[in-house]
Every structure is written in C-alpha cells, then in structure tokens.
C-alpha cells in the first residue's frame, strides 16, 4: 500500500515512474503533451536549437497554436507566427493549426480531444491549467522548459501541496462559473495557493458543465496555483466520449489524502461579481459596481469564449442594442464555436445588437490587437487578468466579470446585471 | 556569484504585464525587451537602472503570464538579482532556467530601502545592505534547483545529459 495521495500527487508519481511522491519532492517526469503559442514558441524553438536537438520527442505530442497575435497584427508578429509554422512543417507536428482552423489554445485543445484525463501537460502559457477541468495535471511553464521538453519529452516538477476547495449547495439563478472562481480568488488572494495545486470539489462544482469547469480551472493560476483539478465524473465522461483521440486514465484522489488546507464555501454566498482593477482578487458584487461607466465590453478568451458563454451573452443581448459610445467585442474562442454561433443564430443576435464579431484570437485579452484600450478607457471583460496595462494603455482599466454581466453592461453603458435592463 | 548595486524597491504582486507589457511581445529580442522593462510600473526605471542593480519587492513577484520575456527583459536591462518575499511559481522557474539570480528573503525586503546599495552572494544566499550595514540570509535553493543553476541553466544541464546519452533524449 502506498500513502494516500491527492490527484496531483498520483499523476506526478505515475509520470515520474514512482509508486508515491510527497509534497516538496522534486521529480522528473515524462510529459504527455508540450504546448506553445506564437508568443512563447519562438523562444522555445531557440532553446530547442541551442540544445543541438534536431527532432521533437514525438511529433504527435507537440501542440503549436498561433493564437495571440494571429491573424498576424503586424510584421513582427507575422515573423513570429512564421517561425512557428515553419518549425511545425519541418518537424511534421501533427497538432498545428493554421489561422481559420486555429483558436485560442485552451479552448481548442480540449475541444479537439487532444487532452485527456490523467495526462501530464506542460504549456508555455500560464493558463495551461485550464485542462485541470478534464482531470489532467496541466501547468504553465516558460519557454526554456517548453523548449527542453520539445527535445526530451521531460520536465522537472516540485510536487505541490494540495488545497481542496469545496463549494457545496446550489448556485442561485444568474450566478455562473466565473462568479464562483472570482469568489474563490477573492477569498484566497492572488498568491493564496502559490506553489500549490487546487482540487475543486463539492456539489456546486459537480453541477457545473464542462465549459463552466474550464472557466474555473482556467483561473486557478490567478490564485498562484500550479494546477486546478476536477475529478472525472459522469458529466466529464459524457463530454469526453467520442472526443478524446487517445485512451485516457481517470485519476481519483484517495479519500484520506492529506491536504495543506481545506476551504469550504457555501454556494449561496456566491453572487454575480466583478474583479476591479488591478488584481483578479479585488472582487466586489456586480450590484455594488453599477457606478462604473464603460467604454468597451469584451466577451471571449480562454476563460469565457466557449459556446455556453456566448449563449448566455446572446440571451442578454437579444432584442437589445449596445449603448451608444460603447464597443462590445465578441470573440468565439475557436472556429467550431464560431460555426455554432452562426448555426444557433447567436451571430445574428450579436450583429443586430451592434457588436463587433471577431474571428477567434486572444487579441484584446492581452492588449495585443482587435480592441486595445486608450488611456482613461474602461472595459468590462470576461477574460482573466486586469493588471495595469493588460489591455492597453497603463492608464486604462479592466473589470473582470462573467458573460451575463459583460453583456448587460454593454447594453447599459455601465456595469450592470441582466435584471437591470428593461 | 557576487553582485553589488543600487536598489529599486517595489511593492507586492509585481506582475509580468508591468515587467514587460504584452504590446512588446511581438519581439523576443532581449535588447528590445530591455528597453521596456518595468515600463508600466516605473517609466523611469529603464533610464535609471545601471548594470548590477538589484530589484527588491514584496510577495508574489512575477505573477501573471508565463512569458519568459519577463526575466529576460530584467536581465538584459542590467538587473543582477531580484530579492523578493516570494515569487510566483512560473517566474521562479523561468528565472532559474534563464539565469536571472533570485533570492527569497522577507526579512531583507522588510529592511532594505529604495536607493540603498546592497551586495548579494547568490551562492550562499547572503545579502548585505551596504548603506545601513544590516545583513540577511535568504533561503537556500533546493539541491535539485541548485544543480540546474550550477550547470549554467536548464539548457546547459540538458545538453550535458543528451551528450552523455549519445544525443538521444
Ligand atoms: S485568451 Fe488571454 S489569457 Fe487566454 S491564452 Fe489568450 S492571451 Fe492568454
């Protein structure tokens, strides 16, 4: 019998070829997938060349996704995207997507069945933790780690302690997954789970759809966490079935596994909320944020650019118009989601309401293109970060919210709840 | 390694968006990135920083994105070492992997003021505030991490391992 282990410990042990691991232990693991994007891959490729490597460790286990500045915003970003494209073709990388088929990496990989439960994934992007929703141990690293792993298929990890966040009861109508994770980050603080792995549990978490779970896991890093994990259950099994391109392994925590900390939250305490500038932990009820006039609303990103999010936004925008003087930018996270928006009539709702409907891209989320803010401008955004200068000028402001609040705010011209609209 | 330099003192949660704003991520050239280091937090930083200078900051330094451009920009701007109360984990990895010296030492952060001259020995973690005469010692690195640093970074370490295995990972 090995010691009781958490999900994070079980998965790291399995990939390190060990029977058991303990928090704090440093292990070297075989990884199942290595991911990089158009911003981080160029540096990772430099590392790859510096190593003298000529072939990637496994052409089917490398994911290269041009999403941040793609479709290319300028000559420099075009050159970065080209470096990645040329490398993908030279190496015969099977998981490379060209603009038109590419989407935001953390929406695209799960959708396309590339990531599965039990996988150990490193990505040169901090929101790689999104795949924790699928029961994969997935974490962000830098370009050097990614470059080394491209060559070797290996990476080092410090086994994290586990924080168990249990949300029990039922969420009130109008409260979404984004509100839950903002509430959690507000409680824990932006470094509340630093160097730790979060296990999300409890009846309110189990009641979330896979899209909702991905929203939650996506923002685990905003509490400093290395990973944000959900156990695989029937909801996950159904979503995964017929989708996963490889057989997968469900990893469950032992009931008596030791956690560094347990955080119990009553779902009834979670209300629609907004993270004010300039930290994701600066959370206040949306109802107390109505004085904030906005210039832009952004509905999209790896946090809230999935079909479920767009359906919610469309239900608020249907039959209404975006307030004069406000830009509402809607960005489906992948081409498949764009297509669904057309098929379900959501695209028409957005266009009739006077929204900008964009091709999939990270774009404005990181102040890249397609919605950069001027000094003094304010944006309510379904993204995950509101740091100084995140979406443009350092004197601009970002308020993080769920899709319903973002859409209602676009109509009202200030932060608002759907119930505020006539 | 020993460094001596003037301190740039900042608060907690210094994030990667202020260390190197995303609008400059269409380049990965260290000299280009260096010109914009810390721009959104301290627009005067780049004109004032001298080779060897030290950043001292509170908890959670480097939180936010995984962009390795952040430690690269600081190093290329001339920063020799960052002393913080704690580091965000991806920044911690990236600093080690790219050879930017970092030390975790809440006591030193508490006591050191902006503009002080400090000397740092990254091998034994000793920190001395030359302006006030106070000394501190930072947490030593775990042996595995120290090994990576001694090898000259993760790339060097991996290159050696690959060579030992005859070029195959
Ligand atoms: S949508 Fe935003 S947070 Fe997500 S991967 Fe793109 S830039 Fe990063």
Image (spheres, coloured by chain):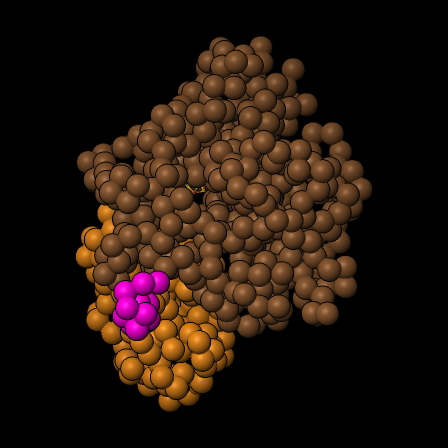
Ligand 1 found in image quarter: top left
Q: Tell me the residue at 75%/54% (across/down).
A: A264
Q: In the visual, does A382 lie left or right of A216?
A: left
Q: In which quadrant will I find the N terminus of chain B? A: bottom left
* Residues shaded magenta: B156-169
Q: Is residue B98 above or below residue A412?
A: below
Q: In the visual, does A21 lie left or right of A29?
A: right
> Which chain is in brown here?
A
Q: Is residue A227 above or below residue A9?
A: above
Residue B104 visible in the displayed image: yes
Instruction: Please identify the quarter of the rendering in which residue A345 is found.
Output: top right
Q: Is residue B102 above or below residue A335?
A: below
Q: Nearer the viewer, residue A280 or A79?
A: A79
Q: Tell me the residue at 45%/29% (across/down).
A: A334
Residue A188: image x %, image y %?
63, 56
Q: Is residue B162 magenta?
A: yes
Residue B87: image x %, image y %?
46, 65
Residue A220 visible in the displayed image: no
């Amino acid at each position: 019998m090995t010691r009781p282990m958490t999900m994070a410990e079980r998965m790291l042990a399995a990939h390190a070829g060990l029977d058991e691991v303990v928090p704090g232990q440093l292990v070297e693991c075989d990884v199942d997938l290595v991911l990089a994007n158009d911003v981080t891959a160029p540096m990772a490729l430099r590392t790859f060349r510096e190593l003298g490597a000529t072939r990637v460790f496994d052409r089917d286990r490398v994911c290269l996704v041009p999403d941040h500045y793609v479709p290319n915003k300028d000559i420099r970003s075009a050159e970065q995207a080209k470096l990645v494209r040329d490398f993908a073709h030279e190496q015969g990388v099977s998981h490379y997507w060209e603009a038109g088929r590419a989407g935001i990496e953390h929406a695209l990989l799960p959708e396309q069945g590339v990531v599965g439960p039990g996988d150990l994934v490193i990505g040169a992007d901090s929101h790689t933790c999104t795949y924790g929703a699928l029961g994969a141990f997935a974490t962000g690293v830098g370009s050097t780690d990614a470059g080394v792993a491209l060559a070797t298929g290996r990476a080092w990890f410090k086994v994290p302690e586990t924080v168990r966040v249990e949300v029990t009861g039922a969420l009130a109508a109008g409260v979404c997954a984004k509100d839950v994770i903002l509430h959690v980050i507000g409680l824990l603080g932006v470094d509340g789970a630093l160097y730790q792995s979060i296990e999300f549990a409890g009846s309110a978490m189990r009641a979330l759809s896979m899209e909702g779970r991905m929203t939650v896991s996506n923002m685990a890093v905003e509490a400093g966490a290395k990973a944000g994990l959900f156990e695989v259950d029937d909801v996950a099994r159904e979503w995964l079935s017929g989708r996963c391109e490889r057989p997968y392994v469900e990893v469950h925590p032992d009931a008596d596994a030791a956690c560094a900390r347990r955080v119990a939250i009553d779902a009834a305490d979670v209300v629609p909320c907004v993270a004010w500038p300039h930290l994701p932990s600066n959370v206040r009820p949306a109802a107390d944020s109505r004085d904030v006039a906005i210039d832009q609303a952004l509905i999209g990103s790896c946090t809230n650019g999935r079909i479920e999010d767009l359906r919610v936004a469309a239900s608020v925008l249907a039959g209404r118009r975006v307030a004069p003087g406000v830009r509402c930018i809607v960005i489906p996270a992948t081409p498949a989601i764009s297509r669904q928006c057309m098929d379900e009539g959501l695209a028409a709702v957005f266009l009739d309401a006077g929204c900008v409907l964009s091709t999939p891209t990270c774009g404005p989320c990181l102040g890249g293109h397609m919605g950069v803010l001027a000094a003094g401008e304010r944006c309510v955004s379904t993204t995950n970060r509101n740091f100084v200068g995140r979406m443009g000028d350092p004197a601009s402001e970002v308020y993080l919210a769920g899709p319903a609040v973002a859409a209602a705010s676009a109509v009202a011209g200030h932060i608002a709840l759907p119930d505020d609209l006539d | 390694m020993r460094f001596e330099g003037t301190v740039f003192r900042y608060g907690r949660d210094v994030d990667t968006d202020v260390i190197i704003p995303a609008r400059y991520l269409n380049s990965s050239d260290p000299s280009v990135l260096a010109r914009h280091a810390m721009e959104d937090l301290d627009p005067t930083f780049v004109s004032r920083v001298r080779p060897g200078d030290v950043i001292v900051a509170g908890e959670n330094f480097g939180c936010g994105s995984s962009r390795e451009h952040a430690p690269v920009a600081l190093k290329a701007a001339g920063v020799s070492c960052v002393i913080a109360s704690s580091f965000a984990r991806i920044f911690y990895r990236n600093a080690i992997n790219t050879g930017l010296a970092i030390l975790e030492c809440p006591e030193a952060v508490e006591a050191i003021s902006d503009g002080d001259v400090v000397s740092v020995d990254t091998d034994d973690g000793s920190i001395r505030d030359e302006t006030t005469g106070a000394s501190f010692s930072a947490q030593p690195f775990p042996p595995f991490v120290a090994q990576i640093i001694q090898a000259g970074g993760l790339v060097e370490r991996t290159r050696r391992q690959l060579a030992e295995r005859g070029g195959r990972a």
